[in-house]
Amino acid sequence: MSLSINFWGVRGSKPTPNKDTRLFGGNTACVKVVAGNRTLILDGGTGLAELGHKMKLNKGEKTADIFFSHLHWDHIQGIPFFQPLYKAGNSFRLYGEDKNPLTFKEIITKQMSPPYFPITMGMMQADYEFISIKADDVINLGEGIIIKTFALNHPGGCLAYRIEKGDYAIVYATDTQPILGARNNDFIKFVAGADVFIYDTHFTEAEYRGEIDGESKESWGHSTWEEGINISQNAEVGYYVLFHYKEDRTDAEQAKIEKQAQREYPKTVAAREGMNIIIGGDYPEKVVINYPY
């Protein structure tokens, strides 16, 4: 038994496909997790379109549980271009939060309609189901897979996910400002002992405090790689994965940040499109990272 993680989109805010982002990738958030016979997809940014193209090439019917952290554009941009949704016989369950006065289903359906997009959800041939969830839910997917949720600190709200199967755990926590006070203690408990901790590292501490351009980012809803170090140390995670990079962060800058973070928390890696992490496979190490190049 093992868990497999594949990164299809690691960028924040907007896609940035250019020569300076090719190493780490320019697609927005999308992570695929395979747990036993189940496929889970975390967020539907532009990376979801790339994942869909890959899934289409594989024979047979496709099924997956798709969990949305929140519904800002960079986390849903890939839905209209996710090709498996257009094919009969495929089956998907979509999970996300209601936002008063709209339900999760109404929000997704609305953005998949004219004048925003010419194809409606009703025109898609796959079977799909919308499931509304909220913070502090515990979702039993069967086959020993448990999903737990936690409310992050982001404008409009955002959910972190903890995926557990047997003795293994992954925490996906994107789009959050540093969490303060007692809630931070709760978050550390939520993350505690995770084999892989994927965290919003949009800013550096200097950028966050406005020391670079004179503008504080303390209300923008994103965190720093330094804060992720603090959480990783207190929660004693296996691997700390940098994620959701600032849209104009170059490969050279991100590689430098990765090295800085590794000096403080050696088991740190910056997520790259195409990178694969295996937890509990047939390897001497519990966690194995396979780079795309």
Image (spheres, grey):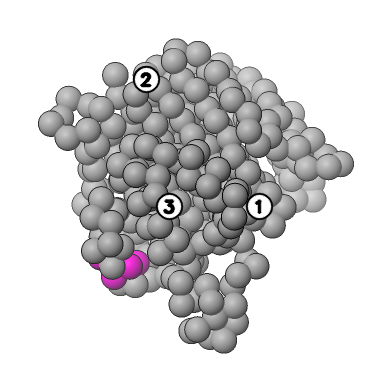
Q: Where is residue 243 in the image (x, y as percent from the top left)?
A: 43, 54
Residue at (38%, 37%) from the top-left corner?
A: 194
* Marks 2/1: CA–CA distance: 32 Å
Residue that label 3 marks? 231
> Do the residues bearing badges 2 and 1 touch, measured as CB atoms within 8 Å?
no
Residues shaded magenta:
254-259
Residue that label 1 marks? 72
Residue that label 2 marks? 166
Residue at (43%, 26%) from the top-left corner?
A: 164
**In the displayed structure image, the side of residue 207 where residue 275 appears, left or right:** left
Residue 264 is a magenta residue: no
**In the displayed structure image, the side of residue 210 where residue 125 appears, left or right:** right
Q: Nearer the viewer, residue 87 or 35?
A: 35
* Marks 1/3: CA–CA distance: 25 Å
Task: Name above or below for residue 45 compared with residue 37.
Answer: below
- SS assignment at label 2: loop
Kindly identify which numbered label has been placed on residue 25. none
